[in-house]
Amino acid sequence: QLQLMESGGEWVQPGGSLRLSCAASGYTLLAANVGWFRQAPGKEREAVSCTSSFDRDAKYADSARGRFTITRDLASNAVYLQMDDLEPEETAIYYCAASLVYNFCSLAPKDYSDWGRGTQVTVSS
């Protein structure tokens, strides 16, 4: 099983950038399908991005496409989410999730079995 830990969340001004990290222990994330999700107070959890294990396919939510980039790093056994031009509405707890079942890139939370505990991102002046 995977143990995931998010980091990199902080207070940033509108239009600023952050790079979130999803680090894994117990197994390499190179063999896992990984997704990024976020949840704001009083709202449902929503997808941000995903990447598949084998073919390295990547998908983005409409709101994130063009501003966010998901990448993998072998040396650190981590998946990153680069977020540019952030907006106040994107203030939320950001989670990474993983699945080892088979190759896919899914924006549906139900398709992931392992979740981190989240990192807080706050976008305000």
Image (spheres, grey):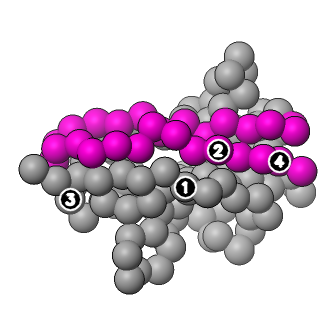
- Lower sequence index among marks 1 and 3: 3
Circle 1 sits on which residue? 118
Asked if one can make out residue 7 in the rendered structure from this viewpoint, the answer is yes
Q: Secondary structure at mark 4?
A: loop
Residue 35, which numbered label? none
Is residue 23 rendered magenta in the image?
A: yes
Does residue 14 appear to the left or right of 95 in the view shown? left
Asked if residue 59 lies in the magenta stretch, the reply is: no
Lower position in the chain sequence, tag 4 or tag 3: 4
- According to the picture, the residue beneath numbered tag 3 turns out to be 88
Decide which of tag 1 and tag 2 comes sooner along the chain: 2
* Residue bearing mark 4: 2
Percent from the top left, x then y, of residue 21?
A: 54, 36
Residue 122 vertical position relative to residue 53 in the rendered view, above or below: below
Nearer-the-camera pick, 37 or 54 = 37
Above or below, 93 relative to 79: below
Q: Secondary structure at mark 2?
A: strand
Q: Real-space Cα distance between discs 1 and 4?
A: 15 Å
Q: Amino acid at mark 4?
A: Leu
Q: Which residue is mark 2?
A: 5
Q: Secondary structure at mark 1?
A: loop
| For the residues bearing labels 1 and 3, Cβ distance under 8 angstroms | no
Residue at (45% x, 69% y) in the render: 39
x and y percent of residue 87 in the render? Answer: 21, 54
